[in-house]
Amino acid sequence: MEGRSEIDVVMRGPGYLLVAEASLTSDISVSTTYDPNRNQIARNIDCVLENADTELPIFWMIVKDRGPGRMYVQLIDQWRQDLAALIQMLPHRAAFEVEAVMDRCAVITWDEILEAIEPATEDEFDLWAELLSRTN
């Protein structure tokens, strides 16, 4: 009904599937085209659950900041306090599935990623420098 989702980052490894929404400046969309009550994070969580099969489902937000005015911060904090609110948004998912994703949900800043990596090639350095310039 919603059409294909455009997932920013997908990493699959032995026993896990990670889906990440990556944003340099913008906040999340609080509604989707076909469902004004379904936001971008809920949609991405639904996507990771749909594709995880027997793998551990993981969802991350990769963002510029964790400011309290950001909708992604507010929603994730709300769902950590009241998981039922997210479960209501995903009525076709079992509560234990939604809980499994929220147990591993993280909001990670670009600065934290840049601090954790060291570019090995000139191309990687160029990408690193470009990200650094956009996050400051």
Image (cartoon, rainbow, N blue to C red):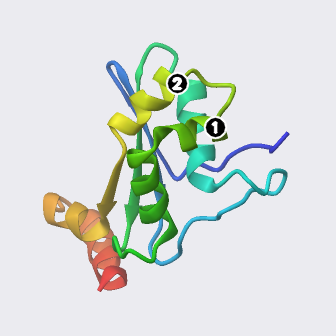
Q: Which amino acid lies under the numbered mark 1 shown in the image of this protein?
A: Gln
Where 29 sits versus 81, above or below?
below
Cα gap from disc 2 to disc 1, whole angstroms: 9 Å
Q: Quadrant of residue 87?
A: top right
Where 68 sits versus 74, above or below?
below
The disc, 2 or 1, on the residue closer to the chain's N-terminal end is 1
- Residue 43 x, y percent position in the rendering: 63, 45
Quadrant containing the N terminus is top right
| Lateral position of residue 75 relative to residue 80, left or right | right
> Is disc 1 surrounded by few (<14), some (14 to 19) or many (20+) residues within 10 Å?
few
Residue name at image x 45 percent, y 64 percent: 74
Where 73 sits versus 55, above or below?
below
Residue name at image x 47 percent, y 78 percent: 25
> Is disc 2 surrounded by few (<14), some (14 to 19) or many (20+) residues within 10 Å?
some
Q: Quadrant of residue 64?
A: bottom left
| Lateral position of residue 102 relative to residue 26, left or right | left
Q: How many numbered callouts? A: 2
Q: Nearer the viewer, residue 127 or 34?
A: 34
- Residue 122 x, y percent position in the rendering: 23, 68
- Residue 134 x, y percent position in the rendering: 37, 82
**Does dot 1 land on a helix, a strand or a loop?**
helix
Q: Nearer the viewer, residue 125 or 102?
A: 102
Residue name at image x 43 percent, y 30 percent: 99
User: In the rendering, which numbered label is found on residue 17?
Assistant: none
**Does dot 2 land on a helix, a strand or a loop?**
helix
Q: Nearer the viewer, residue 44 or 133?
A: 44
- Residue 106 x, y percent position in the rendering: 33, 50
Q: Residue furthest top?
A: 54
Q: Which residue is mark 2?
A: 95
Q: Which residue is mark 1?
A: 88
Q: Which amino acid lies under the numbered mark 2 shown in the image of this protein?
A: Ala
| Lateral position of residue 4 relative to residue 107, left or right | right
